Image (cartoon, rainbow, N blue to C red):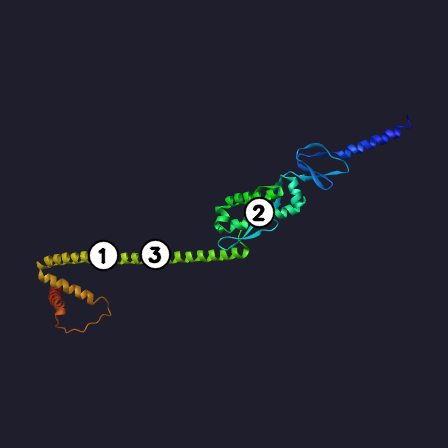
Amino acid sequence: MRERLPLFAGVGLFVFAILSMSLFTVDQRQHALVFQLGEVKEQISEPGLHFKIPLIQNVRYFDKRILTLDTTEPERFITSEKKNVLVDLFVKWRIVDPKLYYISVGGDEARAKTRLEQTVNAGLREEFGKRTVHEVVSGERDRIMDDMRIKADQDSRKIGVQIVDVRLKRVDLPSEVSESVYRRMEAERKRVANELRSQGGAEAEKIKADADKQREVIIAEAYRQAQIVKGEGDAKASAIYAQAFGQSPEFYAFYRSLEAYRSSFKSKSDLMVVEPNAEFFKYLKGAGARSAPASDAAKGAKSTK
């Protein structure tokens, strides 16, 4: 019995080895393809423990999770206006038919991404070529992504892949175009600003001219009213003077002469060359004649005393 123990142990190890080579597990995040002599024999998508023929069959696993295709550099597309735009995008995809996926791209994820990238780029060129810059930037961006997802999914089904989502992360104009657009916008803003300034200057001049006109009209009207009032005042004053001096013409003549004397002899340096018998000295002569008898009477009174 002891002599057979090594034999039993060897048989047990062989059976264990055979069983370990025959059993394999499939994770819930994986697809599995069972190959027999290089040919796909079975496709397994359900998780669990499965069997295969050892040494004859082998298993290859493929990811069932959603994968991401992200562009490293923005792609250049042309709109219907013949303008270039730079587009940065990413694609969400997953393997739904591992057998077709293996047959189409040999199970190589890099080849699958290249195929998807070509499909998406071709579809985007078609979509962008039908729309303007405004539409692709904001107007119909969601519609472009939805249409692109549907078209890309239809093509990717041929290689056993489902397109879950297509997203445009950024849509920009090239730097040289952005610079020219900025310069054009700056020039347009300056033109509008200059136009508004000129209009404001014209309005200011118009307002100023109207204000000056109103000022002159007001001043003229005030001057006219002042002259009217002054004329009425002079007329009333003349009437009053005429009425007052009309009662005593001699006194009026004397008063006028006094005013003339006052105006003529304001300063000691005033000098007049007039004949002594002139009418101008009428009242001065009269004052001298009247003052002489008065002085003689005064002298007589003193001598009497």
Q: Neighbour class for label 2 at 10 Å: few (<14), some, many (≥20)?
A: many
> Nearest the camera: 45 or 207?
45
Q: Nearer the viewer, mark 1 or mark 2?
A: 2
Residue at the image position 56 percent from the left and 50 percent from the top: 122
Q: Is 121 on the left-hand or right-hand side of 139?
A: right
Whole-angstrom CA distance, mark 1 to mark 2, is 78 Å
> Nearest the camera: 262 or 142?
142
User: Nearer the N terminus, badge 3 or badge 1?
Assistant: 3
Residue at the image position 60 percent from the left and 44 percent from the top: 156
Q: Is 214 on the left-hand or right-hand side of 289?
A: right
Give the residue pinned by disc 3. Answer: 203
User: Nearer the N terminus, badge 1 or badge 2?
Assistant: 2
User: Nearer the N terminus, badge 2 or badge 3?
Assistant: 2
Q: Is residue 298 above or below residue 90?
A: below
Residue at the image position 48 percent from the left and 50 percent from the top: 134
Amino acid type, label 1? Glu
Q: Quadrant of residue 266?
A: bottom left
Q: Is residue 16 above or below residue 95?
A: above
Q: In the drawing, what numbered circle is on residue 89?
A: 2
Q: Neighbour class for label 1 at 10 Å: few (<14), some, many (≥20)?
A: few
Whole-angstrom CA distance, mark 2 to mark 3, is 53 Å
Amino acid type, label 3? Glu
* Marks 2 and 3 close (CB-CB < 8 Å): no
Give the residue pinned by disc 1. Answer: 221
